Amino acid sequence: MAETVLKVAGISKRFGGLQALSDVGLTIERGQVYGLIGPNGAGKTTFFNVITGLYTPDSGSFELGGKPYRPSAVHEVAKAGIARTFQNIRLFAEMTALENVMVGRHLRTGSGLLGAIFRTSSFLAEERAIRERARELLDYVGIGQYADYKARTLSYGDQRRLEIARALATEPQLIALDEPAAGMNATEKVQLRELIERIRRDNRTVLLIEHDVKLVMGLCDRVTVLEYGKLLAEGTPAEVQHNEKVIEAYLGSGAH
Amino acid sequence: MKSNRFQTLLFAAALLLLPLLLQGFGNAWVRIADMALLYVMLALGLNIVVGYAGLLDLGYVAFFAVGAYLYGLLSSPHLTDTFPALAALFPGGLHLPLLLIVPLAALLAGAAGIVLGAPTLKLRGDYLAIVTLGFGEIIRVFMNNLDHPVNITNGPKGIDQIDAIHLFGLNLGKRLTVGGFELASVTLYYYLFLALVLLTVVISHRLELSRIGRAWMAIREDEIAAKAMGINTRDMKLLAFGMGASFGGVSGAMFAGFQGFISPESFSLMESVMIVAMVVLGGIGHLPGVILGAVLLSALPEVLRYVAGPLQAMTGGRLDAAILRQLLTALAMIVVMLLRPRGLWPTPEHGKSLKHFL
């Protein structure tokens, strides 16, 4: 039995009269790419925002890396070990690519005001380590050559990669990608897929929220399908693809 | 690299010789340079809040006031005159040494920065600007009215007879004769202020290239993403407010010692606006730009005051120096913003030339 990274159960969230999520749960194991799909308005993003601490759920239990976990403040979530990317890319536009990734190291480093002002040897050593790690990560996602370019000058696909590198810099137990393929062309999608496969090979765990069914089915180890805030199906991509309820939700009844 | 070092040396020599040169034309010119240095310190402090952390603070002059009043109260007869009990405690009067005043001013203004910053943490952009503007005014109004029921600030009359700054037994308020060459009091102040400005630049520069500086800039660029990276935005914003305010406090204390007199008038909203203008005009977040902006906006109008005479004569006195000064400042700002919207000397587009700056 593989090690469980994230285990959530019984999550419900209501916005006024809308029950956005009711009793949703999933279990992600180390080294998996876990897909979360569903038609528009199914509650994917709400679910994502709940586990990344943006929304407080009305009920539900969480366990991250075997420890109980309560997503409260957003920055605590990153500390606990979930790093995320954003559906509409949110980079630090006026900072260089390298600096963006260096910000990701903030959490795992600790030098303070006085260390910076007096440039103590421990501060300098830490800065060097941060820079080195950031460079490695830029190379890892394949944009090392743009280290000194401002983030906003990178191409769309490269910005996505930079976001992933920045998320990886926080040493997450789980990296959550919110529709990373949105707006990408075919080549960029292939490259993204290669990158995610590479992340998985390095025994990292990925939660992938995606519209692109083809990408999800080809990439994920397990998939959860949501509809109207409820769990519709869960299983391997093949199982889910042949699930009648899923086919009905996506294609309408009588489609098969 | 070699020519770079040569340039730095040349620049340093020019900075050191400048007041000696200006002294020849009259002390008023050195005084302008002194004030310019104080404004550079203020602009650099505000740059931490506005330039790095991206928090538009329109009440920054409040911290300048806090520093000035701290020095004014602790180095003038005002408190001992008002409170006989205090006079009994300090029979020689209150005269705090500079080496105590500077850290104290930094600390107190920093604390004020954190206290005023705390309620604004959830605000952004225009809303933040309005609230900080209000806070700045509150401090000034306090200074103006705290002469009743207990006379602490002496109200609009201000505090006078403030001690000149003493440094290692040297009275900066008196001229110094070194081997037959006379150094005016304003020249001595110039060197003190220059040293403090250098210190401010070094601290700013080092913070910029640190984990904390990056966290500030991340908040400026995208607060939600910064949070998602695990940055405690509340603490980092408060640190920026406190750090920026402490520079303002030191500058204020120097101002009080330099002028010998302070009153609430010196800390009006217009001053806050001018400091923001210096940062924005020069190149927000870019140290050389901010320094340039501060020097231009503080020194040029003063210089203008001296050359405005003929114009005034031509218009029969209707266009006096004060009006001309505002007019030309406004005009210069409009032109700069139209032609160089990112400031006169903005952060370079690619890479960091800043690394080579110091």
Image (cartoon, coloured by chain):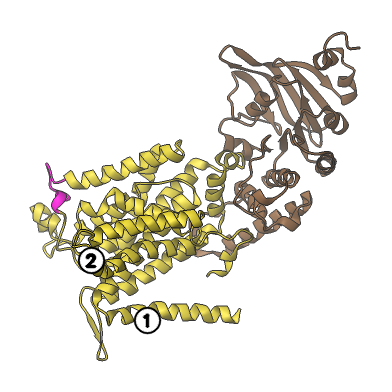
Chain colours: A brown, B yellow
**Residue wearing tag 1:** B17
Q: Is residue A81 above or below residue B255?
A: above
Instruction: Name the amino acid, label 2.
Output: Met
Mark 2 or mark 1: which comes first in sequence?
1
Looking at the image, the residue that sits furthest to the bottom is B180
Report helix, strand or loop for mark 2: helix
Disc 1 marks a residue whose amino acid type is: Leu
Tell me if mark 2 has few (under 14), some (14-19) or many (20+) residues whose alpha carbon lies within 10 angstroms of its own. Answer: few
Do the residues indicated by labels 2 and 1 lie within the same chain of the protein? yes
Dot 1 lies on which element?
Answer: helix
Query: Residue B171, can we see it?
Result: no
Q: Quadrant of residue B250?
A: bottom left
Q: Is residue A153 left or right of residue B344?
A: right
- Residue at label 2? B314
| Residue A42 as seen in the image, left or right of residue B262 | right
Question: Closer to the camera, B278 or B60?
Answer: B278
